[in-house]
Amino acid sequence: MNPARRIRDEIAAAIRSGEWRPGDRVPTEQELAARYECARATVSKALAELAASGLVERRRKAGTFVAHPPVHSAVMTVPDLAELIAARGDAYRWALTSATHEAAGDELCAGPALRIAGIHMAADEPFALERRFIALDEVPAAAGADFAAEAPGTWLLGHIPWTQARHVIRAVNPARKEAALLGIGAGAACLELDRTTWRAGRVVTHVRQLFRGDRFDLVAEFNAGP
């Protein structure tokens, strides 16, 4: 097994079993490197992945600690754009523009990945651009899926359960090529949704979706607390 993955998985197991409790200090990088007989860079990579999944918190000059469960005032789901567009009464279509297999991904996905790009269409007009990777170690069936026929987000929701998701939402101006694909001016406002989903602490997929600002609203409904 990859050393960084082994360290990550064993620490995650200790946290989920309750052996390590929220607020407990994780051994230092030096201590973990000695325990696993590996380089500090390998340990740092494992801890970075655990921090990204929300299991640990890295504090500058203080060390790494088991994270406390987050408290949220509102909950956002992982939406299926095909369903959202159809519910609005528009015809939906997904247009795949590229799909490539890579032997190694990036800081979120060190193993093999499938990288996909495409356009979500509503009523035959561009609705959103999508760039996504899928971690093939976690979702091997994705390698044989027909993403020209079905959008990857729809396929993943139907095949792979997720346990944690993180959204980062921001207003942006599109690049010239992106604006052209969306059929808008280069200075137009867009909404960018950057989302990572995990299953049992392991990254399943990361996606960047760029929406026309005049076509998409994010709405959260919630009740007052006690």
Image (spheres, rainbow, N blue to C red):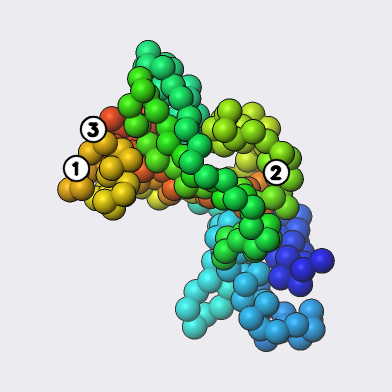
Q: In which quarter of the view is residue 19 placed?
A: bottom right
Label 2 SS? helix
Quadrant of the drawing holding the N terminus: bottom right
Which residue bears the numbered disc 2? 143
Judged left or right of residue 141, residue 128 is: left
Tell me which label, 2 or 3, sits earlier in the chain: 2
Q: Is residue 199 above or below residue 48?
A: above
Q: Which residue is under mark 3?
A: 214
Whole-percent x, y for residue 225 in the image: 40, 35
**Residue sitting at 48 percent across and 41 percent down?**
97
Residue found 64% across the figure and 29% down from its top: 158
Q: Identify the mark nearer the N-term, 2 or 1.
A: 2
At x 61%, y 32%, the residue is: 155
Q: Position of residue 171 (x, y in %)?
A: 27, 48
| Contact, mark 2 vs mark 1 (Cβ under 8 Å) | no
Quarter of the image with the C terminus is top left
Mark 3 secondary-structure assignment: loop
Marks 3 and 1, how far apart in space? 12 Å
Q: Residue under label 1, please give it.
A: 185
Residue 213 in the image: above or below residue 174: above
Q: Are marks 2 and 3 in contact (CB under 8 Å)?
A: no
Identified at 58% across, 73% down, the residue is 64
Q: Quadrant of residue 142?
A: top right
